[in-house]
Amino acid sequence: SQQGEEDPQALSIQEGENATMNCSYKTSINNLQWYRQNSGRGLVHLILIRSNEREKHSGRLRVTLDTSKKSSSLLITASRAADTASYFCATDGSGGSNYKLTFGKGTLLTVNP
Amino acid sequence: SAVISQKPSRDICQRGTSLTIQCQVDSQVTMMFWYRQQPGQSLTLIATANQGSEATYESGFVIDKFPISRPNLTFSTLTVSNMSPEDSSIYLCSVTAGGFGDEQFFGPGTRLTVL
């Protein structure tokens, strides 16, 4: 079964607003990674958060991880039209497989200018 | 981060033919993986490409359909054999430099359309 599940499936906001996407997973993890994908192209790595970390920042991105709830959130502040993309969370460590990633279904973010 | 290239970037193929996708990394990496992303879907792991030995396939994927080579620490190929329209997908390779919990980086993908 799918390890990660993002919500919402689609999110439409205005430029300058903040966007929050959530990811839930089912089994214990070592790490959780967030990726961006523009129009069916390759995945761009955004951030990795380890299971012993609770929050991480990178530029306009803020990721939180709550292992007790098996959930993570990605916050993009002051969004731009260029942030329009699909965002995926991916977990590893399930079933003892440290490097094999299991992806959520993704959130399609549209930032309107 | 590793710089990863894939060839071809896209292709349109006829049913019953095969296509080999190449993945080249600019540095030696421990782990290389192949993923499939069907239209409108998320990514699914096909196999782990092991250097010098046979690839390790995930449930639902078999070597006869997706033979993989990894002759060295910077290069791998994935062949999609005897293609059908259901194989139309984006195929992506990914790498991790190794070590517990390393970031995994992806290539630009190969968009395959089977007619």
Image (spheres, rainbow, N blue to C red):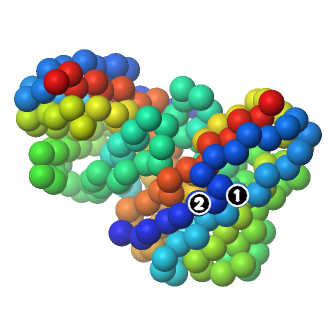
Residue name at image x 20 percent, y 22 percent: A112
Q: Which chain carries label 2?
A: B
Give coordinates of residue A54: x percent, y percent: 17, 49
State the residue position of label 2: B6
The disc placed on residue B45 is: none
Q: Mark 1 lies on which chain?
A: B
Q: What element carries label 2?
A: strand
Observer able to see residue B7:
yes
Observer able to see residue B30:
no
Inspect the image, locate mark 2, and give the three-letter code of the amino acid beneath it. Answer: Gln
Give coordinates of residue B100: x percent, y percent: 41, 69
Inspect the image, locate mark 1, and give the three-letter code of the amino acid beneath it. Answer: Ile
Residue name at image x 41 percent, y 31 percent: A106
State the residue position of label 1: B21
Q: Where B93 falls versus A4 (above or below)? A: below
Determine whether, in the image, residue A100 is placed left or right of residue A112.
Answer: right
Mark sitting earlier along the chain (2/1): 2
How many numbered markers are drawn? 2
Give coordinates of residue A75: x percent, y percent: 17, 36
Task: Determine the CA span between mark 2 and mark 1.
Answer: 7 Å
Marks 2 and 1: same chain? yes
Q: Image quadrant for the C terminus of chain A?
A: top left
Determine whether, in the image, residue B32 is placed left or right of residue B100.
Answer: right
Give coordinates of residue B26: x percent, y percent: 49, 77
Whether tag 2 and tag 1 are in contact, CB under 8 A, the answer is: yes
Determine whether, in the image, residue B60 is placed left or right of residue B23.
Answer: right
